[in-house]
Amino acid sequence: MCALTAGQRGRRVLLLDHAESAGKKILISGGGRCNFTNTETVAARYISENPHFCRAALARYTQHDFLGLVGKHGIAWHEKTLGQLFCDGSAREILRMLLDECAAGGVDIRLSHRVTDVSRDDVYRVATDHGVFTAPALVLATGGLSIPKMGATGLAHEIAARFGLPLTAIRPGLVPLTFGGADLALMQPLSGVSLPVRATSGRTGFDEAMLFTHRGLSGPAILQISSYWREGQAISLDLLPGADAAGVLIARKAARPKAELRTILGEVLPQRLALAVAGRFGDGPIGQMRDHALSEVGGFLKGCRLVPAGTEGYAKAEVTLGGVATAALSQRTMEAKAVPGLFVIGEAVDVTGWLGGYNFQWAWSSGWCAGEAL
């Protein structure tokens, strides 16, 4: 995005990529259909030490601007839940669009070029395993540490630090949570079970699907809350969002006293989960359970508190939280305030979006702003 924007302004642009093919992360996104933006993009859905930093870029190049580019190339798309936009066909259409726009701007793309050193005197000097390149401006657009098998590295962080730009704390984001002990023993037999929940950490909560795994919990609700969770903290799960669980159980006790707890729970929860919860509280005819016992079951369903042992790490994280501190960058151009000609964009910056196309939109917006300023 940055390269095509600058190229179409008449700038001479060289794009270096250590991968053997362009846009590898684009191709795997959205199950191969690329969740390329979100209609609900607003600054409040991004995490940063300065939550206001991203406002300028998101306002200057919006989700509607990117959708216009998609339309220009005749790419069919559809909206799923929560404003998430996907290609009808393949993520390859988005990649082809970007490459075609780069070609229109005369961008020189060099693949399989591994950067070995970066320095600056009167110009920037980038040494690679294919030779040395010089330019008056340098853009760091190499992402973060998430999904190393796709070639992700900390190169942007290393180069930024070399030029004196501060970094915030870096950790995996949008990542499955792992558990141990009794919690994991409860979850492992439920591996593969999915249900809608409300997952909460502190004051932040998300209403989406949750998936039990052999190591803990995943699914959109868990990935979302993982970006807000910190080690040692508990998360809270509402397994029946929007329902009065205790009220439902007590009402069904009055109507069907001979029904077993597992049967009643199986009417509102997946069967395996219903069996596990019933086993935890003592299964049997619901009519033989006191109301306060049913209220305990209801309380568990509405506010199950768990302390994760950790996360699945960068290997399974969709994004990297943290990065180059926004205080060091211009929010309008993404240029380093103290290092003229050095720009940092996308995931390398301490701006991380929610699940659902927000991080792609940050890439398009921040890339466009730098491309306009180069």
Image: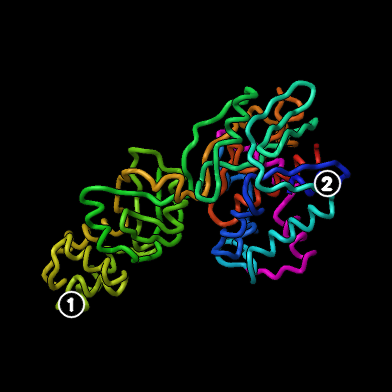
Q: Nearer the viewer, residue 112 or 370?
A: 112
Which residue does the image show at 35% across and 63% down from the upper left?
Answer: 240
Q: Which numbered dot is residue 259? A: 1
- How far apart marks 2 and 1 lie (CA) works out to 70 Å
- Say if residue 192 shows up in the picture: yes
Q: Check residue 52 for magenta coloring.
A: yes
Q: Which residue is farthest left? A: 288
- Label 2, on which residue? 7
Q: Which numbered dot is residue 182? A: none
The answer to which quarter of the image holds residue 266 is: bottom left
* Residue 94 percent coordinates (x, y): 69, 61
* Residue 69 percent coordinates (x, y): 77, 59
Q: Check residue 214 for magenta coloring.
A: no
**Does 256 sit above or below residue 219?**
below
Q: What residue type is labelled 1?
A: Ala
Which residue does the image show at 16% across and 61% down from the upper left?
Answer: 281
Q: Which of 156 and 78 is in front in this view?
A: 156
Which residue does the image show at 40% across and 56% down from the upper left?
Answer: 218
Identify the colour scheme used: rainbow
- Say if residue 60 shows up in the picture: no
**Does 169 sit above or below residue 151?**
above
Q: In this view, does 236 lie to the left or right of 183?
A: right
**Does 172 sit above or below residue 41?**
above
The region drawn magenta spans 49-78
* Residue 346 percent coordinates (x, y): 64, 43
Q: Which residue is farthest front? A: 130
Q: What residue type is labelled 2?
A: Gly
Which residue does the image show at 46% across and 58% down from the upper left?
Answer: 220
